[in-house]
Amino acid sequence: MLPPVPHLSPGPHLALVATSARSLVECAHADGYQAIALDVFGDVDTCRLATCCEPLGSAGLAMDREALLRALARLRARGDVAGWVAGSGFEAQLDLLDEAARLLPLLGNPPEVVRRVRDPGAFFAVLDALGITYPASSTALPRDPHGWLVKDAHACGGWHVRPLGALPDGTGPGRSSAGLHFQRAVAGEPWSCLFLAAAGDVTLVGFSRQIVRALGARPYVYRGGIGPLLPSPAVQAALRAAALGLTRAFGLVGLNGIDFVLDPGGRPWLLELNPRPTAATQLFAASGLMRAHLDACAGRPVAGLPVCDAQVRGFETVFVRRPGQVDASVSAWMESQAWCCDIPQPGTRHAWGDPLCTVRAEGDSAQTVQRDLAERRRAVLSRLQSLQENVFGCR
């Protein structure tokens, strides 16, 4: 039996648990909650904003299982922590989500719901039943690898997505996971839709265009997003219908995200459902989202979501291309840039492909924001090159 979801009003202590908890901490802080950050990185700005910050890092950027369970047990013993919100990082550790939810109330979709969503066979069956358009998908290895992608529903960030034909002999991924499946590639732009599920109904929070580019041999690495943006009314209606159908089929609550591709003809193809608050929350209203999420999870009426303004925002992760270490001067320079966040602590070591920091921008159009993000990414890399020549190699 899981602990009941408590009544929360602004002010109580709330734990935010994710690979990187910064965006969740910002969301909670904006609504008046006392944020406790439990994540892999323990970045400078995350810890400054949170009332308490505890890094849970381990090898491979995964959360340390025992460290998380110990931290949640300590929070339960305190008696003043209402519960915790899960962000990214549990996709490959569904059993950990179960264990953690038994220690302290999980304020979001329960583990059994997440498990069903992350089961490719069950998920595609629901899409079929609802008549939702999605790329041809299979849990069995296709005979002809051409045009097929290998994906893992127990992973996130796009690192797991690779062309099947690019793997040795096209024979498969060479590893075992309950989330492995194969999907036809669809040409178009990657988008996402953030929505709130409450009492069997949904409210669309907003749409954003994803920033996805290759990193080394990984062609579909998720780097960030730009929004709020408005697709056509037909796309908005299709995504609302999909969100409503998925909410009722899986029993979703709170903030959730749908990833989809908008093909050249303007047709949306649903790729994935993220049954949790996503990184895109930082693109929308500055306040009100965490309160709405918690009200929805507790079954309370949601007073109304804040209206997004016309300002377009964007964020993009900068990735390391060579091993290195962040010294105090690099960290301090990042802190001095108002558009830089997820700032590593001095002394942080990085392996190839690790996230270094995040750059942000805002403007009156997606084009302006995209341009500014690119300039700021280059500024970070240029600064790193000048301060630590031959230590980092990023792009």
Image (cartoon, rainbow, N blue to C red):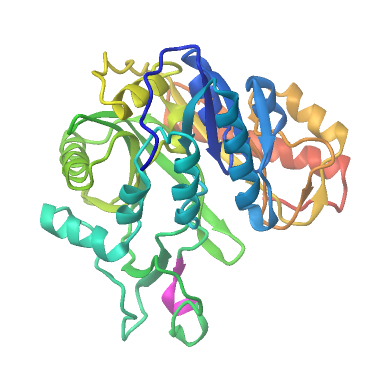
Work out whether residue 26 or residue 191 is closer to the camera in this orientation and state it: 26
Q: Is residue 388 visible?
A: yes
Helix, strand or loop for the magenta stretch, by majority: helix
Q: Quadrant of the N terminus?
A: top left
Q: Can you tell which quarter of the image residue 134 is in?
A: bottom left
Q: Is residue 187 above or below residue 69?
A: below
Work out whether residue 93 or residue 357 is closer to the camera in this orientation and state it: 93
Which residues make up the magenta segment? 162-166
Q: Is residue 135 visible?
A: no
Which residue does the image show at 21% across and 51% down from the upper left?
265
**318 is within the stretch colored magenta:** no
Q: Is residue 230 above or below residue 145?
A: above
Which residue does the image show at 40% across and 60% down from the upper left?
153
| Residue 84 image position (x, y, % from top left) | 48, 32
**163 is within the stretch colored magenta:** yes
Work out whether residue 217 or residue 12 is closer to the camera in this orientation and state it: 12
Q: As drawn, is 170 to the left or to the right of 387?
A: left
Q: Is residue 187 above or below residue 340?
A: below
Q: As drawn, is 345 to the left or to the right of 70?
A: right
| Residue 201 image position (x, y, % from top left) | 17, 31
Work out whether residue 233 or residue 21 is closer to the camera in this orientation and state it: 21
Q: Is residue 18 above or below residue 178?
A: above
